[in-house]
Image (spheres, rainbow, N blue to C red):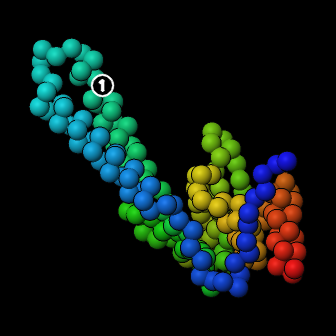
């Protein structure tokens, strides 16, 4: 039997927050930072002109991977908040993005290289913007269902629409019981 996806409609409980586990996020930031600093220390204090080429290249590669992980954890979506009249996308180092529900125009779930959620919306200046987030964000099916419920102008493809309609009717039946 397939695994059942637990979702919940949140229209009556606003504001609702979805976020990465803060302990995991802090742990990954610490590991990335320590790895980057140790790689720099190794390059400065231990590697000299007589060191083998591997000892010169490997710390640079490790430093690159650690800094990349650090940047991804600080600039990717950290928290998503459904407020009464807008959706807020919060990050650690980037400014918060506020998207009013009527401005959300499209919701899609694509897999070019990895699974991503794409939210197309019109910003305050009327320009069309696309926000992409990683498919590993917590409770993504529930988030998509609630965007579908709260955004009156959203368009989605037929496959995703069918899946979200099934989730919505199942949740409404559970609430009626």
Can I make out residue 176 in this image?
A: yes
In this rendering, the answer to whether 131 lies above or below 40 is below
Q: Position of residue 18 (x, y in %)?
A: 57, 68
Q: Look at 18% across and 30% down and name the residue there.
A: 43
Q: Position of residue 175 (x, y in %)?
A: 82, 79
In this rendering, the answer to whether 126 lies above or below 36 is below
Can I make out residue 125 in this image?
A: no
Q: Position of residue 60 (x, y in %)?
A: 28, 30
Q: Position of residue 144 (x, y in %)?
A: 71, 64
Q: Nearer the viewer, residue 30 or 149?
A: 30
In this rendering, the answer to whether 54 lies above or below 29 is above
In this rendering, the answer to whether 81 lies above or below 158 is below
Q: Look at 65% across and 55% down and name the residue there.
A: 117
Q: Nearer the viewer, residue 45 or 23?
A: 23
Q: Nearer the viewer, residue 164 or 94?
A: 164
Q: Look at 73% across and 66% down and name the residue there.
A: 7
Please tell me whether mark 1 sits on a helix, a strand or a loop.
helix
Residue marked by disc 1: 58
Q: Is residue 46 left or right of residue 56?
A: left
């Amino acid at each position: 039997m397939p695994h059942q996806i637990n979702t919940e409609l949140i229209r009556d409980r606003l504001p609702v927050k979805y976020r990465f586990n803060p302990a995991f996020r802090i742990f990954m930031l610490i590991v990335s930072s320590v790895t980057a600093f140790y790689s720099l220390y190794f390059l400065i204090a231990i590697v000299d002109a007589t060191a083998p080429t591997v000892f010169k290249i490997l710390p640079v590669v490790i430093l690159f991977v650690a800094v990349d992980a650090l940047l991804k954890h600080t600039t990717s979506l950290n928290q998503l908040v459904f407020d009464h009249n807008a959706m807020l996308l919060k990050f650690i180092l980037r400014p918060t993005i506020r998207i009013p529900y009527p401005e959300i125009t499209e919701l899609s779930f694509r897999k070019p290289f990895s699974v991503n959620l794409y939210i197309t919306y019109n910003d305050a200046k009327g320009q069309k913007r696309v926000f992409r987030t990683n498919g590993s964000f917590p409770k993504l099916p529930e988030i998509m269902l609630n965007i579908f419920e709260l955004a009156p102008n959203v368009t989605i493809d037929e496959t995703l629409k069918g899946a979200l309609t099934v989730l919505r009717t199942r949740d409404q039946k559970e609430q009626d019981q």
